[in-house]
């Protein structure tokens, strides 16, 4: 809904958001899988909304692997290269180079049904990259990969973006992936772009919260003696959440100027030696926590929409005894 963004050359733009927030819809529209119903879609400064051909070269890795069970991994890459205009000999040689680059030589003659989920995902990524396009769209590209493979693929992405000076949009649920690869990040909630900026900018703007997580035998005693009596947070606003009988979490609203980290750590260490707590952590809000806060916003909006749906056929009326009642348009009766 009214999403406006631009991606520069040699930039990777990350799309974050809860499931169902519209990330895949935005990417599918950008890849012409869906026809946009309104607005404009520009590539290289040209409006492509009413294009009459498929002349916009895009490398696209969709969320679901689009492969053919009757073709080997090698045949997939060779076919896509051939469709781009390479001769058969050129397509063959380039396909072997791409497969070697992605460390897929051991699987090049296997059918998709013989590949693991992570390897099949690498095939989808390779299809997107072999198009040699300066525009790359990636929908959760590393989902299902083991950590070692994921890191190698990240290095591939960084090298490709740099070498081709490409404009890349990538959706992901991995905050580590977003921080490592993306120059800027946008968070979608219920189809709306709620924030946009570099990871550092988002943490500065939305991350003015510190998290204190405490393990203690007596939560109430810790709260009274350390938080209240010793004024641990030095007058800063905070919220408390009891995670269990022996664990409590505090979210402290404070800016960098008023946050005396040394006082907090000195106080906590002193009280740990005194036996008031067994363990603790104190850290600034991470990008993941910011994402979770926006995800909570989605749940709140869904609940509000549900309430509005229930009340949409009701109007407030004033009756004789000056009390308010609700009258249903359908049932035409007053409810008190």
Image (cartoon, rainbow, N blue to C red):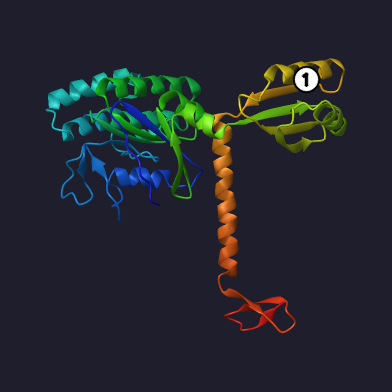
Q: Describe the element under mark 1 as helix, strand or loop.
A: helix
Q: How many marks?
A: 1
- Camera sees residue 49: yes
Left or right: 327 in relation to 83: right
Residue in the picture at 62% in, 24% down: 257
Residue 110 in view, yes or no: no
128 up-or-down from 107: above or below = below
Q: Write down the quadrant of residue 216 in the picture.
A: top right
The C terminus lies in which quarter of the figure? Answer: bottom right
The spot of residue 6 in percent (x, y) is: 32, 38
User: Residue 78, located in which quarter of the rendered image?
Assistant: top left
Q: Is residue 315 above or below residue 8?
A: below
Q: Residues within 10 Å of mark 1 (few under 14, many from 20)?
A: many
Q: Which of the two residues, 144 or 227, is positioned nearer the viewer here? A: 227
The residue sitting at 22% across, 33% down in the picture is 80
Q: Nearer the viewer, residue 133 or 219?
A: 219
Q: Position of residue 59 (x, y in %)?
A: 28, 34
What residue sits right under mark 1 in the picture?
Answer: 268
Q: Percent x, y for residue 297?
A: 57, 47
Residue 265 horizontal side relative to residue 257, left or right: right
* Residue 166 position in % (x across, y down): 28, 28
Q: Is residue 58 left or right of residue 283?
A: left
Residue at image position (29%, 38%) is 70
Left or right of 322, for residue 12: left
Quarter location, residue 133: top left
């Amino acid at each position: 809904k009214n999403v406006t963004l631009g991606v520069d050359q040699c930039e990777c733009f990350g799309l974050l958001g809860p499931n169902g927030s519209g990330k895949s819809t935005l990417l599918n529209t950008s890849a012409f899988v869906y026809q946009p119903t309104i607005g404009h879609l520009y590539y290289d400064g040209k409006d492509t909304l009413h294009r009459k051909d498929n002349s916009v070269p895009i490398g696209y890795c969709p969320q679901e692997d689009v492969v053919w069970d009757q073709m080997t991994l090698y045949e997939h890459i060779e076919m896509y290269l051939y469709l781009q205009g390479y001769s058969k000999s050129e397509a063959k040689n380039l396909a072997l180079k791409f497969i070697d680059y992605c460390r897929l030589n051991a699987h090049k003659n296997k059918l998709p049904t013989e590949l693991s989920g992570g390897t099949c995902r690498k095939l989808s990524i390779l299809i997107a990259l072999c198009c040699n396009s300066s525009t790359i769209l990636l929908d959760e590209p590393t989902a299902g990969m083991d950590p070692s493979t994921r890191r190698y693929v990240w290095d591939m992405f960084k090298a490709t973006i740099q070498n081709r000076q490409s404009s890349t949009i990538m959706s992901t649920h991995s905050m580590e992936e977003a921080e490592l690869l993306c120059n800027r990040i946008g968070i979608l909630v219920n189809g709306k772009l709620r924030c946009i900026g570099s990871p550092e900018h988002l943490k500065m703007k939305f991350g003015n919260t510190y998290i204190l997580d405490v393990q203690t035998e007596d939560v109430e005693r810790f709260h009274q003696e350390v938080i209240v009596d010793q004024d641990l947070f030095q007058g800063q606003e905070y919220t408390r959440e009891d995670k269990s009988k022996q664990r409590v979490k505090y979210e402290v609203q404070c800016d960098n100027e008023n946050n005396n980290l040394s006082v907090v750590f000195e106080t906590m260490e002193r009280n740990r030696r005194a036996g008031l707590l067994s363990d603790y952590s104190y850290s600034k809000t991470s990008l993941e926590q910011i994402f979770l806060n926006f995800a909570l916003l989605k749940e709140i909006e869904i609940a509000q929409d549900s309430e509005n749906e229930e009340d949409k056929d009701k109007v407030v009326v004033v009756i004789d005894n000056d009390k308010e009642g609700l009258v249903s348009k359908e049932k035409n009766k007053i409810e008190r």
